[in-house]
Amino acid sequence: MWKEIVQICVWNNPDMALRADAQRNLEQIIAAAKQVFTEQGPEVPMEEIARAAGVGVGTLYRRFPDREALIRAVTRANFDAVLDETRSAMAEEPTAWDTLRRFFHLSRELRLSVQLNLVHMSTRRLLLEDTDAIGRRDEMFELVEQMVAAAQREGTLRADVGAGDIAMLVSLLVGQTRREWTPAALLGVERAIALILDGLRAGTGTELPGQPVPVTEIAPQKATGNY
């Protein structure tokens, strides 16, 4: 029924069809850019992204006049996906520890967000100048802080870690994993996450040096000359 209604609307309004095509192209480009950035990094030629999206190079540049605009769009889309998944985990998991464990197993959007925002120095300054991306990133860190506080209240997460420590562990995990996700590489990631979670559990592990790492040390609030 809804499909027929949409078809009738499109027949009666050709501009709607054009808008639908434009939206579809936009979604294809962002999805392709996510995949290519994850596999090859953000320096990949724009022409390759156009091929992966199944659109012409002209279409790509009409939507995104340069690489910076595309990276910003991908970053915002990734953060939105991570925020949605994190909120779902917080609402659906029975315990705060289960929520934290699910957060470490989030989809490739989290890996790409961390890679672009924390690992790839070529994009880090660019993203720190994007107020929309910063807002989404800070919202994600607020959710991590909530997860950490909830898990410590229930006594499952050791008391000497903070949200910055969790962010650092995720960034280290992402930065050291391979882009070619072979079965062996995927298994290695699962084992690394299991070891990390064991170390984060309350009542286990050795005493940590210093104080919990603040989030501000992991994610500076604005671009500077220092990286």
Image: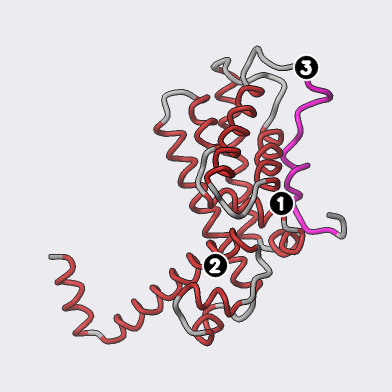
Q: Is residue 176 left or right of residue 194?
A: right
Residue at the disc numbered 3? 207
Q: CA distance from mark 3 to mark 2?
A: 42 Å
Residue at the disc numbered 1? 118
Residue at the disc numbered 2? 33
Q: Secondary structure at mark 3?
A: loop
Of the numbered discs 1 and 2, the one sitting upstream in the chain is 2
So how many labels did they put on this image?
3
Which-is-in-front pick, marks 1 and 2? Answer: 2
What percent of the width, then of the height, locates residue 124? 73, 59
Q: Secondary structure at mark 1?
A: helix
* Main SS class of the magenta portion in the image: loop
Residue found at x 59% / y 36%? 144
Quadrant in the picture for the C terminus: bottom right
Q: Amino acid at mark 2?
A: Ala
Of the numbered discs 3 and 2, the one sitting upstream in the chain is 2
Location of residue 44 with respect to 115 vertically, above or below = below
Q: Amino acid at mark 3?
A: Glu
Q: Is residue 204 left or right of residue 76?
A: right
Q: CA distance from mark 1 to mark 3?
A: 27 Å
Give the image quarter of residue 141: top right
In contact (CB < 8 Å): disc 3 and disc 2: no
In contact (CB < 8 Å): disc 1 and disc 3: no
What percent of the width, then of the height, locates residue 212? 76, 28
